[in-house]
Image (cartoon, grey):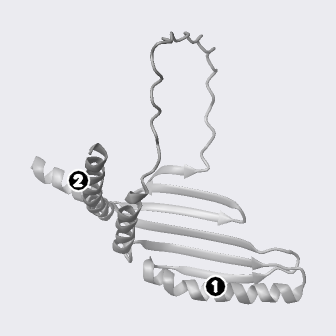
Amino acid sequence: MIAAVAAALVLLILALPLGVWFRYDDGTLEAAASVGPVTVFRYPMEPRRRKPKKPPKPKKARRTDPDKPPEPKKSGKFNWKLLKPLLSILLDLLGQMRRKLLVPELFLCVRCGGKDAAHTALQYGKAWALIGSLDPVLHNCFRIAHRQAEVLCDYHSDRLRLLLEMRVRLRVGTALWLGLQALCRLIPVFLQYKKKAVQ
């Protein structure tokens, strides 16, 4: 009985959706991440109450031995030889996530403005051309349930404004499986790099 309840609980957790929501409105970004109905992250974060700062403790002076040679500094440079296998693993992971991401809602609004009416009309045509070229790419990468795109001409503004709102969902089980596959490929790469570094 306990094993059946535990198995059902594990299946329920694996079936929970991981959700990401973000909204970009003319330079202002809002984002949130959730697991099932629970929001685990939100940007911008709500301001927390600041605790009164305690006075800093006086630091003790370290004794230095003049005869002791200085310790060599550790170099934190990135080994660019790792970039190729890491990039290959990342591209494969993105390829496996293709069509596994569900987009329940995608809303795009472009407000075109310019110096004059002719420039605004030119921006209007470029915006629709860009949306038309991106549309098949989005449908190829995501499963989009509802999409709405509109381009408006704002003759009272002299610049282009963008509003983008998008929700993305992925099952916890799918995310764990893809992460496990990537981890199994990353471990041999780092072990081989560590072995070469020791030699």
Disc 1 marks a residue whose amino acid type is Leu
Residue 47 picture location, percent across and down: 63, 39
Task: Find disc 1 in the rendering and name its residue.
Answer: 130
Disc 2 marks a residue whose amino acid type is Leu
Residue 151 picture location, percent across and down: 71, 83
With respect to residue 93, does 33 lie above or below?
A: above
Task: Find disc 2 in the rendering and name its residue.
Answer: 9
7 displayed left or right of 62: left
Residue at position x 57%, y 62% from top?
22
Residue 107 picture location, percent across and down: 60, 75
Quadrant including the C terminus: top left
Q: Nearer the viewer, residue 166 or 116?
A: 116
Q: Nearer the viewer, residue 76 or 187?
A: 76
Q: How many numbered circles are shown?
A: 2
How dense is the environment of label 1, judged by Cα within 10 Å: few (below 14), some, or many (20 and up)?
Answer: few
Residue at position x 16%, y 55% from top?
7
Spatial CA distance of label 2 from label 1 is 45 Å
Which image quadrant is residue 110 in? bottom right
